[in-house]
Image (cartoon, rainbow, N blue to C red):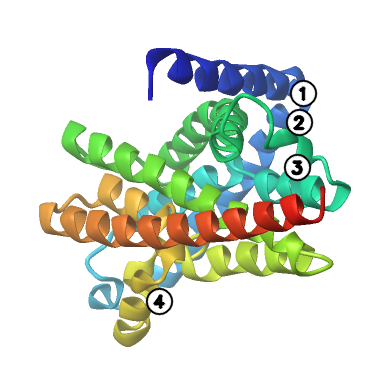
Amino acid sequence: MTYISLLKYWTIAVVHMRSRLTYRTALIAEIPIIILRVWISSHFYQATYNSSTPDQFAHLSVAAVVWSTMFVQCFNTASSRSAAKQIDKEVKTGTLAYSINRPYSYILYHYAAFLGRTLPALLIDVPVGMLAAWYFVGPISTSWTALMCGLCLMLGGYTLNFLFELSIGLLAFYIEDTSSLIWLYSKAIVFFGGFMIPLELFPPSLKIFAQLLPFGQLYASAAQLIVAWQPATCLRFAVLQLIWLIIAGLLSRHLFNKGIKNVSLQGG
Protein backbone atom coordinates (compact mmCIF):
# COMPACT_ATOMS: atom_id res chain seq x y z
CA MET A 1 0.00 0.00 0.00
CA THR A 2 1.42 3.37 -1.05
CA TYR A 3 1.68 6.51 1.04
CA ILE A 4 -1.16 8.08 -0.97
CA SER A 5 -3.42 5.13 -0.17
CA LEU A 6 -2.58 5.31 3.54
CA LEU A 7 -3.27 9.04 3.53
CA LYS A 8 -6.63 8.39 1.86
CA TYR A 9 -7.78 5.98 4.57
CA TRP A 10 -6.35 8.21 7.28
CA THR A 11 -8.49 11.04 5.90
CA ILE A 12 -11.55 8.80 5.96
CA ALA A 13 -10.86 7.95 9.61
CA VAL A 14 -10.43 11.64 10.50
CA VAL A 15 -13.70 12.56 8.77
CA HIS A 16 -15.64 9.97 10.77
CA MET A 17 -13.82 10.95 13.96
CA ARG A 18 -14.90 14.57 13.48
CA SER A 19 -18.40 13.41 12.65
CA ARG A 20 -18.68 11.59 15.97
CA LEU A 21 -17.20 14.54 17.83
CA THR A 22 -20.05 16.61 16.45
CA TYR A 23 -22.38 14.70 18.78
CA ARG A 24 -20.59 15.67 21.97
CA THR A 25 -23.70 15.24 24.07
CA ALA A 26 -23.86 11.54 23.25
CA LEU A 27 -20.20 11.10 24.19
CA ILE A 28 -20.61 13.00 27.45
CA ALA A 29 -23.76 11.02 28.27
CA GLU A 30 -21.62 7.86 28.45
CA ILE A 31 -19.62 9.24 31.41
CA PRO A 32 -22.21 8.61 34.18
CA ILE A 33 -22.90 5.15 32.73
CA ILE A 34 -19.20 4.25 32.95
CA ILE A 35 -18.94 5.55 36.51
CA LEU A 36 -22.08 3.62 37.52
CA ARG A 37 -20.71 0.40 36.03
CA VAL A 38 -17.43 0.75 37.91
CA TRP A 39 -19.29 1.56 41.13
CA ILE A 40 -21.47 -1.55 40.76
CA SER A 41 -18.45 -3.74 39.93
CA SER A 42 -16.47 -2.44 42.91
CA HIS A 43 -19.28 -3.11 45.39
CA PHE A 44 -20.13 -6.47 43.86
CA TYR A 45 -16.58 -7.81 43.93
CA GLN A 46 -15.75 -6.35 47.33
CA ALA A 47 -18.79 -8.13 48.78
CA THR A 48 -17.91 -11.32 46.91
CA TYR A 49 -14.29 -11.31 48.07
CA ASN A 50 -15.30 -10.63 51.68
CA SER A 51 -17.55 -13.70 51.69
CA SER A 52 -15.10 -16.06 49.96
CA THR A 53 -11.61 -17.45 50.34
CA PRO A 54 -8.73 -15.79 48.42
CA ASP A 55 -7.76 -18.96 46.52
CA GLN A 56 -11.08 -18.86 44.66
CA PHE A 57 -10.08 -15.81 42.64
CA ALA A 58 -6.99 -16.86 40.67
CA HIS A 59 -4.78 -14.65 42.86
CA LEU A 60 -6.42 -11.52 41.46
CA SER A 61 -7.14 -8.68 43.86
CA VAL A 62 -10.43 -6.79 43.95
CA ALA A 63 -8.69 -3.86 42.29
CA ALA A 64 -7.33 -6.05 39.47
CA VAL A 65 -10.76 -7.55 38.78
CA VAL A 66 -12.54 -4.17 38.79
CA TRP A 67 -9.88 -2.57 36.59
CA SER A 68 -10.02 -5.53 34.17
CA THR A 69 -13.80 -5.36 33.75
CA MET A 70 -13.58 -1.57 33.47
CA PHE A 71 -11.12 -1.78 30.57
CA VAL A 72 -13.25 -4.37 28.75
CA GLN A 73 -16.40 -2.31 29.21
CA CYS A 74 -14.73 0.89 28.02
CA PHE A 75 -13.10 -0.78 25.00
CA ASN A 76 -16.39 -2.43 24.03
CA THR A 77 -18.60 0.61 24.65
CA ALA A 78 -16.37 2.82 22.51
CA SER A 79 -17.11 0.62 19.49
CA SER A 80 -20.83 0.30 18.91
CA ARG A 81 -22.29 -2.19 16.43
CA SER A 82 -22.31 0.62 13.86
CA ALA A 83 -20.23 -1.18 11.20
CA ALA A 84 -22.54 -4.19 11.00
CA LYS A 85 -25.64 -1.98 10.87
CA GLN A 86 -24.17 0.29 8.20
CA ILE A 87 -23.06 -2.56 5.94
CA ASP A 88 -26.40 -4.32 6.42
CA LYS A 89 -28.15 -1.11 5.34
CA GLU A 90 -25.94 -0.72 2.26
CA VAL A 91 -26.62 -4.29 1.17
CA LYS A 92 -30.39 -3.94 1.60
CA THR A 93 -30.69 -0.54 -0.09
CA GLY A 94 -28.35 -1.46 -2.93
CA THR A 95 -25.91 1.39 -2.28
CA LEU A 96 -23.16 -1.21 -1.94
CA ALA A 97 -23.28 -1.61 -5.73
CA TYR A 98 -22.17 2.02 -6.03
CA SER A 99 -19.73 1.92 -3.11
CA ILE A 100 -17.65 -0.91 -4.57
CA ASN A 101 -17.02 1.14 -7.73
CA ARG A 102 -15.50 4.06 -5.87
CA PRO A 103 -11.70 4.59 -5.89
CA TYR A 104 -11.01 2.84 -2.61
CA SER A 105 -11.28 -0.57 -1.01
CA TYR A 106 -14.78 -1.08 0.36
CA ILE A 107 -13.49 -3.10 3.32
CA LEU A 108 -10.65 -0.70 4.18
CA TYR A 109 -13.04 2.24 3.90
CA HIS A 110 -15.33 0.78 6.54
CA TYR A 111 -12.36 -0.26 8.68
CA ALA A 112 -10.99 3.29 8.67
CA ALA A 113 -14.47 4.66 9.38
CA PHE A 114 -14.90 2.16 12.23
CA LEU A 115 -11.62 3.21 13.87
CA GLY A 116 -12.44 6.88 13.32
CA ARG A 117 -15.79 6.50 15.08
CA THR A 118 -14.24 4.51 17.91
CA LEU A 119 -11.31 6.77 18.82
CA PRO A 120 -13.21 9.79 20.27
CA ALA A 121 -15.27 7.60 22.60
CA LEU A 122 -12.20 5.59 23.57
CA LEU A 123 -10.26 8.72 24.54
CA ILE A 124 -13.13 9.77 26.80
CA ASP A 125 -14.32 6.44 28.20
CA VAL A 126 -10.96 4.99 29.26
CA PRO A 127 -9.68 8.02 31.26
CA VAL A 128 -13.08 8.35 32.97
CA GLY A 129 -13.12 4.63 33.74
CA MET A 130 -9.57 4.75 35.12
CA LEU A 131 -10.40 7.68 37.41
CA ALA A 132 -13.54 5.91 38.63
CA ALA A 133 -11.68 2.64 39.27
CA TRP A 134 -8.89 4.49 41.09
CA TYR A 135 -11.45 6.28 43.28
CA PHE A 136 -13.51 3.19 44.17
CA VAL A 137 -10.84 0.46 44.54
CA GLY A 138 -7.49 2.23 44.33
CA PRO A 139 -4.65 1.98 41.80
CA ILE A 140 -3.06 -1.11 40.29
CA SER A 141 0.59 -1.79 39.53
CA THR A 142 1.44 -2.20 35.86
CA SER A 143 4.35 -1.48 33.53
CA TRP A 144 5.02 0.21 30.22
CA THR A 145 5.58 -3.21 28.66
CA ALA A 146 2.16 -4.36 29.85
CA LEU A 147 0.54 -1.16 28.57
CA MET A 148 2.18 -1.37 25.14
CA CYS A 149 1.33 -5.05 24.68
CA GLY A 150 -2.18 -4.39 25.95
CA LEU A 151 -2.63 -1.57 23.44
CA CYS A 152 -1.42 -3.82 20.60
CA LEU A 153 -3.90 -6.53 21.59
CA MET A 154 -6.61 -3.87 21.92
CA LEU A 155 -5.99 -2.75 18.32
CA GLY A 156 -6.03 -6.37 17.23
CA GLY A 157 -9.28 -6.80 19.15
CA TYR A 158 -10.86 -3.85 17.37
CA THR A 159 -9.74 -5.29 14.04
CA LEU A 160 -11.21 -8.68 14.95
CA ASN A 161 -14.43 -7.03 16.08
CA PHE A 162 -14.67 -5.14 12.79
CA LEU A 163 -14.15 -8.30 10.75
CA PHE A 164 -16.95 -10.06 12.61
CA GLU A 165 -19.22 -7.04 12.19
CA LEU A 166 -18.34 -6.95 8.50
CA SER A 167 -19.28 -10.62 8.16
CA ILE A 168 -22.57 -10.08 10.00
CA GLY A 169 -23.41 -7.11 7.80
CA LEU A 170 -22.60 -9.05 4.62
CA LEU A 171 -24.95 -11.84 5.71
CA ALA A 172 -27.72 -9.45 4.65
CA PHE A 173 -27.10 -10.90 1.17
CA TYR A 174 -28.57 -14.18 2.43
CA ILE A 175 -30.95 -13.42 5.31
CA GLU A 176 -33.65 -10.79 5.58
CA ASP A 177 -32.70 -9.26 8.95
CA THR A 178 -29.30 -9.38 10.65
CA SER A 179 -30.39 -7.47 13.77
CA SER A 180 -30.85 -10.76 15.66
CA LEU A 181 -27.29 -11.79 14.79
CA ILE A 182 -25.99 -8.41 15.95
CA TRP A 183 -27.87 -8.91 19.23
CA LEU A 184 -26.50 -12.43 19.71
CA TYR A 185 -22.97 -11.22 18.95
CA SER A 186 -23.30 -8.43 21.52
CA LYS A 187 -24.53 -10.84 24.19
CA ALA A 188 -21.74 -13.31 23.43
CA ILE A 189 -19.24 -10.51 24.13
CA VAL A 190 -20.99 -9.76 27.44
CA PHE A 191 -20.94 -13.39 28.62
CA PHE A 192 -17.70 -14.70 27.12
CA GLY A 193 -15.72 -11.50 26.57
CA GLY A 194 -14.92 -10.55 30.17
CA PHE A 195 -17.47 -7.73 30.17
CA MET A 196 -18.94 -8.66 33.56
CA ILE A 197 -16.63 -11.36 34.89
CA PRO A 198 -12.93 -11.73 33.97
CA LEU A 199 -12.27 -15.02 32.20
CA GLU A 200 -9.70 -15.87 34.88
CA LEU A 201 -12.55 -16.23 37.40
CA PHE A 202 -14.44 -18.77 35.29
CA PRO A 203 -14.42 -22.43 36.41
CA PRO A 204 -11.29 -24.16 34.98
CA SER A 205 -13.00 -26.07 32.17
CA LEU A 206 -15.21 -23.13 31.18
CA LYS A 207 -12.24 -20.75 31.35
CA ILE A 208 -10.26 -22.80 28.82
CA PHE A 209 -13.29 -22.96 26.52
CA ALA A 210 -14.01 -19.22 26.84
CA GLN A 211 -10.39 -18.26 26.19
CA LEU A 212 -10.38 -20.28 22.97
CA LEU A 213 -13.46 -18.45 21.69
CA PRO A 214 -12.92 -15.24 19.71
CA PHE A 215 -14.94 -13.11 22.14
CA GLY A 216 -12.26 -13.26 24.81
CA GLN A 217 -9.68 -12.13 22.26
CA LEU A 218 -11.52 -8.90 21.52
CA TYR A 219 -10.78 -6.93 24.68
CA ALA A 220 -10.44 -9.28 27.67
CA SER A 221 -6.94 -10.39 26.69
CA ALA A 222 -5.72 -6.79 26.46
CA ALA A 223 -7.34 -5.92 29.79
CA GLN A 224 -5.82 -8.94 31.54
CA LEU A 225 -2.32 -8.12 30.31
CA ILE A 226 -2.59 -4.54 31.56
CA VAL A 227 -3.68 -5.55 35.08
CA ALA A 228 -1.70 -8.80 35.42
CA TRP A 229 1.27 -8.87 33.05
CA GLN A 230 2.83 -12.23 32.21
CA PRO A 231 5.06 -12.76 29.12
CA ALA A 232 3.80 -16.31 28.55
CA THR A 233 0.18 -15.15 28.72
CA CYS A 234 0.93 -12.35 26.28
CA LEU A 235 2.37 -14.79 23.75
CA ARG A 236 -0.59 -17.16 24.13
CA PHE A 237 -3.11 -14.37 23.66
CA ALA A 238 -1.22 -12.96 20.67
CA VAL A 239 -1.21 -16.36 18.94
CA LEU A 240 -4.91 -16.96 19.65
CA GLN A 241 -5.83 -13.50 18.43
CA LEU A 242 -3.78 -13.94 15.26
CA ILE A 243 -5.52 -17.26 14.52
CA TRP A 244 -8.95 -15.68 14.92
CA LEU A 245 -7.91 -12.67 12.83
CA ILE A 246 -6.96 -15.02 9.99
CA ILE A 247 -10.22 -16.98 10.31
CA ALA A 248 -12.37 -13.84 10.50
CA GLY A 249 -10.45 -12.24 7.63
CA LEU A 250 -10.94 -15.25 5.37
CA LEU A 251 -14.61 -15.50 6.31
CA SER A 252 -15.36 -11.83 5.66
CA ARG A 253 -13.40 -11.89 2.41
CA HIS A 254 -15.31 -14.96 1.21
CA LEU A 255 -18.68 -13.40 2.06
CA PHE A 256 -17.68 -10.13 0.40
CA ASN A 257 -16.43 -11.74 -2.83
CA LYS A 258 -19.48 -13.99 -3.08
CA GLY A 259 -21.82 -11.09 -2.39
CA ILE A 260 -20.12 -8.86 -4.95
CA LYS A 261 -20.40 -11.63 -7.53
CA ASN A 262 -24.16 -11.76 -6.91
CA VAL A 263 -24.37 -7.98 -7.29
CA SER A 264 -22.51 -8.16 -10.62
CA LEU A 265 -24.64 -11.02 -11.95
CA GLN A 266 -27.89 -9.31 -11.00
CA GLY A 267 -26.81 -5.88 -12.17
CA GLY A 268 -26.87 -4.32 -8.66
Q: Say which residue label 2 marks.
A: 26
Nearest to the observer: residue 57 or residue 18: 18
Q: Report the quarter where the N terminus lies.
A: top left
Q: Where residue 198 sits in the image (x, y, percent)?
A: 40, 64
**Front position in the image: 122 or 4:** 4
For badge 1, the amino acid type reads Tyr
**What residue is drawn where x is 81% and y is 48%?**
89
Q: Residue furthest left?
A: 231
Q: Which residue position holds label 3?
A: 96
Label 3 vs 4, first from the N-terminus: 4
Cα–Cα span, label 4 and label 2 = 39 Å
Looking at the rendered structure, the secondary structure element under dot 4 is: loop
Q: Which residue is mark 4?
A: 51
Structural distance between the alpha carbons of marks 3 and 1 = 26 Å
Give the CA distance from mark 3 to mark 4: 55 Å
Is the Cβ of the residue at disc 1 closer than 8 Å to that at disc 2?
yes
